[in-house]
Image (tube, rainbow, N blue to C red):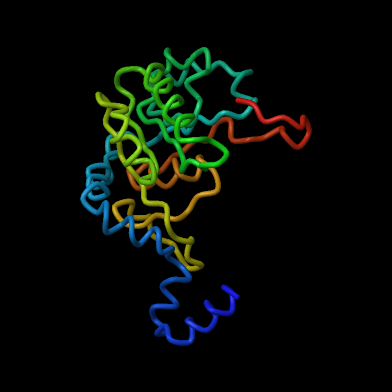
Amino acid sequence: MIKKLINFLILFVPYGVWKLLKIYSLRGIFRYFKYKNILARNKSLKNIAEKKSRCFILCNGPSVKKQNLLPLKNELVFSVSSGYLHEQYSAIQPHFHCVPQITYGVMSEQDVVDWFIEMDKHLGDSAQLILSISEFDLIQRNQLFKNRKIYYLNLGRLIKDNEKNIIDITKISPVISSVPIMSLIVAMYMGYKEIYLLGTEHDSFKSNQYKY
């Protein structure tokens, strides 16, 4: 019944609007206008990499447990999710820490709050956060990361088939399937031309386990 109603309503939607809604989610559009001023802060990240040509995106695949990561100590590093659990994390002190949009239901709101509190304790003093704008209200309500700079991405559209330009993270960014993609989007916006990915592999197909 609902599907038939939607198909009926589509007949009255102008083609240009319908084409727009095939790319942008209603939630992404709503969040853009609600948090426009928050997203505008991302402009300060534009092309900040002019003096440094490379960065490293350190993910949580099993290979990083077998590598000496200390050479990253003087590099520009993005860490992700629960990467702070790595025993060499405090020595590396990544500059940015990325967390994708939370899937509620898999995690409760209290689970997320507890995780963010633990994260804040282990990230070091200088790490800046890059989060989904979907977590903005939760962070404000619970007064999380009070002494840490946070940038937010509005993940609310598809990647366009002919998309070739650097993604403008002050607007509506693509929905990402994994956090390394989120980090890549930000790193390219920052102007990094040489980007190294570490620990992006999964062995869960073989081990039947998913562990950091």
Q: Residue at the spot x=35%, y=46% of the render?
A: 133
Q: Residue at the spot x=46%, y=41% of the render?
A: 100
Question: In the image, is residue 43 above or below residue 79?
Answer: below
Q: Image quadrant for the N terminus?
A: bottom right
Question: In the image, is residue 198 above or below residue 179?
Answer: above
Count of marks overlaid on the render: 0
Query: Is residue 89 found left or right of 153 in the rendered image?
Result: right
Residue 24: % across, % down:
42, 65
Most extreme residue toward the front, as rendered?
1
Question: In the image, is residue 199 above or below residue 1?
Answer: above
Q: Residue at the spot x=38%, y=39% of the render?
A: 131
Residue 150: % across, % down:
30, 35
Query: Is residue 200 found left or right of 148 in the rendered image?
Result: right
Residue 14: % across, % down:
40, 85
Residue 139: % across, % down:
33, 34
Most extreme residue toward the right, as rendered?
206
Q: Quadrant of residue 28?
A: bottom left
Query: Is residue 37 found left or right of 60 in the rendered image?
Result: left
Q: Nearer the viewer, residue 140 or 145?
A: 140
Q: Image quadrant for the C terminus?
A: top right
Q: Residue at the spot x=30%, y=22% of the render?
A: 126
